Amino acid sequence: MKIPSWAAQVLKQMVSDVSHHNLLTLGIASIQGVAVASFEKEDADRLLFFWRQRKECHIFECFLPLPALSSPAREQRSRTSKTELDGSNACNLIWFFFEHIPNSINPMPTNFALFFLGILNVPLATALSFDFPSFDQSSLSKITLQDHASWSSSNNGCFQLTRSERDGNMQSSQGRAVYADPLLLWNNSDYLTDFSTHFAFIINPNGQRQPGDGMAFFLSPFPSNSSSYPNSGGCGLGLFSAMVCQSSTDSISSQPVPIVAVEFDTYPNPALDDPSTPHVGIDVGSARSVEYKTWDADGGDDKWQGDAWVSYDSGTHNLSVVLALRSNGSRTTNYSLSYIVDLREVLISSEVSNGTVYLLHLICSTRQVAVGFSASTGINNETHTLLSWNLSSTLVKHPPVRRRKSKTGLIVGMVTGVGTLLLLLLLGFVFLWSRKKRANIIRDQHQLLDDGLEIQGRPNGFSYEELAAASRNFSEDVKLGEGGFGSVYKGRLERLNVDVAIKRFAKESSKQGKKEYFSELNVISRLGHRNLVKLVGWCQEQQELLLVYEFLPNGSLDSWLYSAQNHLRWPERYKIALDLASAMLYLQHEWEQCVLHRDVKPSNIMLDSAFNAKLGDFGLARLIDHDLSWKTTVNAGTLGYMAPEYLDSGKASKESDVYSFGVVALEIACARRPSTGKLVERAWEFYAKGRVVEAADEKLNGEFDEQQMEQVLVVGLWCAHPDFNLRPSMKQAINVLNGQTALPNLPPC
């Protein structure tokens, strides 16, 4: 579909109407950032907009002509003469255009609607994911370095965020490393982003007994530039005004800055209520940490080597941090902290200025933020080295937030009228197009509905031919695993440019196997959480039943706990326990219905490239009201993970799933199978002797945080208590795991 010529004429006419202004400013939002080019009014008539189709993906392109001028404006325009935009950035382009038209000029809403129709079906911006195990010079194309930050070939390729010893004076240095693409924070109001990131770093005091000042991982409005925050060196960590360190009052810091950061602060600043030792802290709009944990450090010759995991749950607004820190000659110590914060309220500071821009705010409701690292030194100094970085994000649909009613009837009328027009035209187009192109999928959907399944339009329908091609005709070479239901294969969907795991149910599946297929599709298609395996699509064709899931490269948890080749360190294990608890909390308390999984075990817990845990395999899952249980005539699940009362009565409940979680928590800490290793009994024996930490996996060689280990073991025993009346809720369990609630005194079993 090409943009109509009349739509381009509308824009050109709107440009020519600005007759009493010499210059028109047009914002060009690109994936690298926002660049601004100015050009003469008569040049505006030469703007061309058109479509190009690439493998079913529409690309919106904007060309700026280059007149024969010799000026800085021309040089700036030459760098941005051709920009490819996704749907979100196309909205930014229109937004910027209207915001810079003088308020005295009010284009007709009809003309605006016609122009917007020309670009409406540009695909929306997608979630952001990347992985840098180290940094070679090619990574500079995706990571922008600012101020004194530089690339170094040491440590297999790394970034020095501040000046190093070879640069001479290391004092009063600051620098940033910012990912070039934005992170989508939310989209269309009820789609919010969960993200998790892991990075490794070194802070080296270079022999100073009192080093300074520290580094931080941060999120800020996109694009992010250190010039937006002058005088931010020293205690400001390159993010906040350093003037706060010179005042004992809140007069300066009371003005919130649209920044959220996780700081690794090495210099105590009394004006910021800093502790006397280095600490990891969460900063929200200010350099004063809202939560922090101190670490033991003497400075001097020690350098601090850290691994940090930062994750955000957009449903609960929980920002959590896990830090594994090692100093020279000492073992790794782990720290964890969390804080409840709605990132949208902190990071989005701009306000709409007129009715037209407000309309764009409603239609193009997407918000993007920058992610990166910042560091600084003052009179005291140190070096800050970034060794690796990965990040993954997922758009999750949440119940829409109730908004305040608009006070302006005109805006409501414009939104209603234009929205109705757009909806009618789009529905007509979709109807005509889908009749020809997607007849088979529609027929499959009707068949699924006949079988009692509510699809709700969330996952995609795939043809059998496409899935067969993606998996090399289900070759044994790409088989990931096999079970009673059938087999799982790795596949590559070329049109989506994504790797997937294809779960193929055996053709000879029994009635129970078909029931599990429909049950799994019915349940997982409704859910959305960063710690649940994401369903990409399904297929019911040629007597084949297939489910398509996101591919998670690190496989299942049991392959790491019991493999001679793989070794899972304690920080990853602790985070996996937290991730699983978060998924269970969502299933039991945070979704509109209670989801009974009935088969929580390590082989159903998958790990992505950053060892984020995701619960999968919902073939036995059931949806119930929150205050009910599920009665079955045949026990379903795996021995060793099934609660005693479930085995006796066949009645599944929240408490029986909590029992399964408790067994898995003990398995994470002890690396013993419940069926053969007397996992639960052995842990109770150590607990009764007051030495529960001694139940830990011997392969860890004592390299773990004892407090965290005790939390996981005690929560595991609490959840796996044989009396279901004495088990905690998942809310209680996760509070103890996070260290927010004291350990319970467990009654003997």
Image: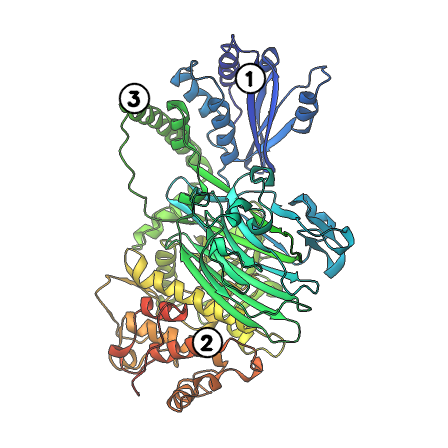
Q: Are marks 3 and 2 in contact (CB under 8 Å)?
A: no
For numbered disc 1, what is the local secondary structure?
strand
For residue 359, which quarter of the picture? Answer: top left
- Way the structure is coloured: rainbow
For residue 36, which quarter of the picture? Answer: top right
For numbered disc 3, what is the local secondary structure?
helix
Q: Which residue is mark 1?
A: 24
Amino acid at the residue labelled 2? Gln
**Where in the figure is residue 445, as x and y percent of width and height?**
37, 48
Image mark for residue 410 = 3
Q: Are marks 2 and 1 in contact (CB under 8 Å)?
A: no
Whether residue 123 is visible: yes
The residue carrying pointer 1 sits among few (fewer than 14), some (14 to 19) or many (20 or more) residues within 10 Å by Cα, namely many
> What distance separates the C-alpha of mark 2 from that of mark 1?
62 Å
Image mark for residue 494 = none
Amino acid at the residue labelled 1? Leu
- Identify which residue is drawn at 35% across, 63% down: 585
Mark positioned earlier in the residue sequence (3 or 2): 3
Q: Which residue is mark 2?
A: 707
> Of discs 1 and 3, which sits in the foreground?
1
> What distance separates the C-alpha of mark 3 from that of mark 2?
59 Å
Above or below 234: residue 117: above
> Of discs 3 and 2, which sits in the foreground?
2
The residue lying toward the viewer, choosing from 38 and 595, is 38
Amino acid at the residue labelled 3? Leu
